[in-house]
Image: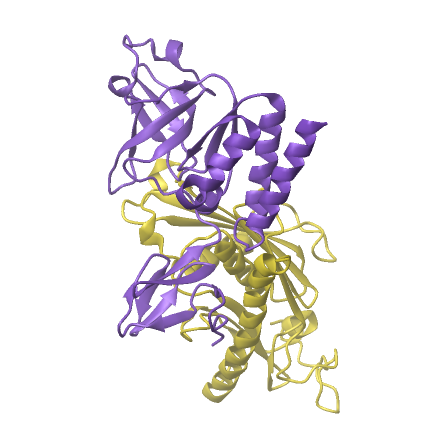
Chain colours: A yellow, B purple
Amino acid sequence: MGGYGDVQLLREDGLRLDGRKVDEMRPVSIQAGILPAADGSAMVTHGLNVAVAAVYGPMEAHPRKIQRQDRAVIDVRYNMAPFSTSDRIRPGFNRRSREISKVTAESLESVVLVERYPRAKIRVEIEILAAEAGTRCAGITAASVALADAGIPMRDMIVGVASGKIEGTVVLDLDKAEDNYGQADLPVGILPNTGEIAFLQMDGDLSPEEYDLAMEYNFKAAGEIHEIMVEALRARYEESEN
Amino acid sequence: MSQGLSGAEQRLVTPGMTIGSLTGMRVGSGAIVHNDEIIATKLGWVRENNGTISVDPINSPYIPRSGDLVIGNVAEVRNNLWFMDINGSFQGLLPMSLAPWKVEYGQARQHMNVGDSSLARVQEVDECHNVVLTMKGVGLRRLSQGAVIDVPVNHLDRIRGEGNANLDRMKETSDCRIIVGENGRVWVDGNENGIDWVREALDIAKQHGHKSSFDSAMKKHEKKFNKKGDA
């Protein structure tokens, strides 16, 4: 939320700069099982974002101090490739990637049946190959598909989706300009079958009414993305049936 | 939300999908109960058997159970025990007392070293997933020849077939000795052509194990070997 109030983000005809309606999502495509070495993997293309997730495990948790006697730990590493944005990103962990890794791990722990694998670790690697706002959401969606592909038991999948506010108008799925110059951003992780929320962050200000509208958009988009996730998993195993 | 395909055909479900109602049904593996509904927890095919609804997963890690015959690789050797990689979440522990040889303290390495494979049985699994292996038993031994091939754990039943029919056919066709470990490892010993043929057959199982085309693909592969033998 850059706070540059003079940047025009909505056209006079009410559409956004890229021609989308306020409640329209960027195109999403998902592919499951793209990495042969991983136990489960997925690639999510959300607008211009490209996120690849790989899942390894469950395996013995090392070092031993991170082991939990009653459940598995989920070790998430979110990383943006140096070439994922127009300005080169310095490789390695930074404050932002640590934060996103942490919130992603906590949200995945709420759906994975971690109590089935005491003392174990499930390693989730999320690599952002191209970034255009909304990478944490694309990463969570990719991780969720990869976990399902790896055969890790989960009580539901998680869909990452975001809404926000630009020029006083609530819009679904912010792109880069809207994210940089908009007034609010509300990324959430939604469990599509139960309607529960696994994580929620808010940057900027929204009134209660605006928040309700943003969540309405998010739930609608989550349903659409979930269908694409299911199709991706089906395609992996049903495509070459004959 | 979206449901799996209905009707008599096999339903492929993803985690979180409702696969049935609790009334009159029991919950099997790969499913949990949430709000009186049975929810799939894994990606796989729904199966109903004698009032029990379960999900046959497409992918699943090996979960050791007491009594399983496994093929392990030695990962680490101590003075009086071996740690074996058994393709599971945790390594199996083979103590000196459960080895088939009389081992002096400190001499474990002379019997089996890192990288060696052996046929063992799971003696015990505790609630913390500690696995104890034994090599005391008929046929349990160090594997000093042949090849060990990895296969998906959930396709083992298809590889064996009804009453081991597929496995027996594979043995007969290839003229190889084949031992299927419950941990998704298959030991094959025989002549080079036979081992190659079994390796290809297991590749077919990896790719077609979850499909109805598996049996026809295997039959086609069997014919291929016969032709090779005639030539």
Could you say which is closer to the camera, residue B55 or residue A190?
Answer: B55
Residue B171 position in % (x across, y down): 50, 31
Residue B126 position in % (x across, y down): 24, 39
Task: Choose top left, top right, bottom left or bottom right for residue A232.
Answer: bottom right
Numbered disc total: 0
Does any portion of residue A99 appear in the rendered image?
no
Task: Choose top left, top right, bottom left or bottom right for residue A23.
Answer: bottom right
Q: Quadrant of the C terminus of chain A?
A: bottom right
Q: Quadrant of the N terminus of chain A?
A: bottom right
Residue at the image position 34 percent from the left and 47 percent from the top: A117
In the image, taking residue A44 as reference, residue B31 lies left or right, namely left
In the image, taking residue B95 as reference, residue A135 lies left or right, namely right
Q: Which residue is outermost to the bottom?
A: A13
Residue A108 position in % (x across, y down): 43, 59
Residue at the image position 59 percent from the left and 47 percent from the top: B207
Q: Which residue is outermost to the front?
A: B230
Could you say which is closer to the camera, residue A120 or residue A150?
Answer: A150
Task: Choose top left, top right, bottom left or bottom right for residue A42.
Answer: bottom right
Residue at the image position 68 percent from the left and 65 percent from the top: A132
Residue at the image position 41 percent from the left and 37 percent from the top: B183
Residue A37 position in % (x across, y down): 58, 42
Could you say which is closer to the camera, residue A222 or residue A134?
Answer: A222
